[in-house]
Image: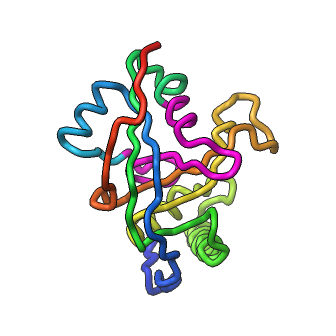
């Protein structure tokens, strides 16, 4: 990461302390059985909030189970799908939804990494937030953020088309009480 160290950036002590989040994970029936038997596998670092295990949360205008269903059925096109409900228990959370302090910390790290990127000859137009999320995924157990799944639409614009509260769990031991919430077939 271009010689960036945690000491050259910001102290990682500002993260929100929370108790338990409830998340919904949409997947295929086959993968749900494997998860129940063997536990979760992390997604890649290419995912929106970095590497980890992804859940949707119910908040204000957003329905977590509905988003998990959409993910499993419409986006992943699973013929047989399952929504798993889990409790996520961690005090080490980067909360980009509810904590101004965490959003400010995220912006600080983003600015510092952008500076490093530009100093190394990179262009601002090809700077990605992936490095910022990768940095935080090594510091926290959970990242929580409001995202716009509408950006997956080829006609996406500045209007938030499909707001979602996503939870990325970077440490699987934070996932407790996993249960099948819903299942179905296309």
Q: Nearer the viewer, residue 182 or 71?
A: 182
One can see residue 101 in this view: yes
Span of residues in magenta: 43-71
Residue at figure coordinates x 23%, y 45% from the top left: 39
| Total count of labels | 0
- Residue 86: x percent and y percent? 38, 49
Residue at figure coordinates x 61%, y 41% from the top left: 63
Question: For residue 115, which quarter of the picture?
Answer: bottom right
Above or below: residue 101 compared with residue 44: below
Residue 69 colored magenta? yes
Which quarter of the rendering shows the N terminus? Answer: bottom left
Residue found at the far top of this picture: 186
- Is 102 positioned to the left or the right of 12 in the image? right
Above or below: residue 186 compared with residue 49: above
- Residue 128: x percent and y percent? 58, 55
Q: Nearer the viewer, residue 154 or 25?
A: 25
Residue 161 colored magenta? no
- Residue 37: x percent and y percent? 18, 38
Above or below: residue 77 compared with residue 128: above
Q: Nearer the viewer, residue 59 or 104?
A: 59
- Is 2 positioned to the left or the right of 39 in the image? right
Indicate how the structure is coloured in the image. Answer: rainbow
One can see residue 119 in this view: no
Residue found at the far left of this picture: 37
Residue at figure coordinates x 31%, y 51% from the top left: 177
- Residue 72: x percent and y percent? 46, 28
Question: For residue 34, which quarter of the picture?
Answer: top left
């Amino acid at each position: 990461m271009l010689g960036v160290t945690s000491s050259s950036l910001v102290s990682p002590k500002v993260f929100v302390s929370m108790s338990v989040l409830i998340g919904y994970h949409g997947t295929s029936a086959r993968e749900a059985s494997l998860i129940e038997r063997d536990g979760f596998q992390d997604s890649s670092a290419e995912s929106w909030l970095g590497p980890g295990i992804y859940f949707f949360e119910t908040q204000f205008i957003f329905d977590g189970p509905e988003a998990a269903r959409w993910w499993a059925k419409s986006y992943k096109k699973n013929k047989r799908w399952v929504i798993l409900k889990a409790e996520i228990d961690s005090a080490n959370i980067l909360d980009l939804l509810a904590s101004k302090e965490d959003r400010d910390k995220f912006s600080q790290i983003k600015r510092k990494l952008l500076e490093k990127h530009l100093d190394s000859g990179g262009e601002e137009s090809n700077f990605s937030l992936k490095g910022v999320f990768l940095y935080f995924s090594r510091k926290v157990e959970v990242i929580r953020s409001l995202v716009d799944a509408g950006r997956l639409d080829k006609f996406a614009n500045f209007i938030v088309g499909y707001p979602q509260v996503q939870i990325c769990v970077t440490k699987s031991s934070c996932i407790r009480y996993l249960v099948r919430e819903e299942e179905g077939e296309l």
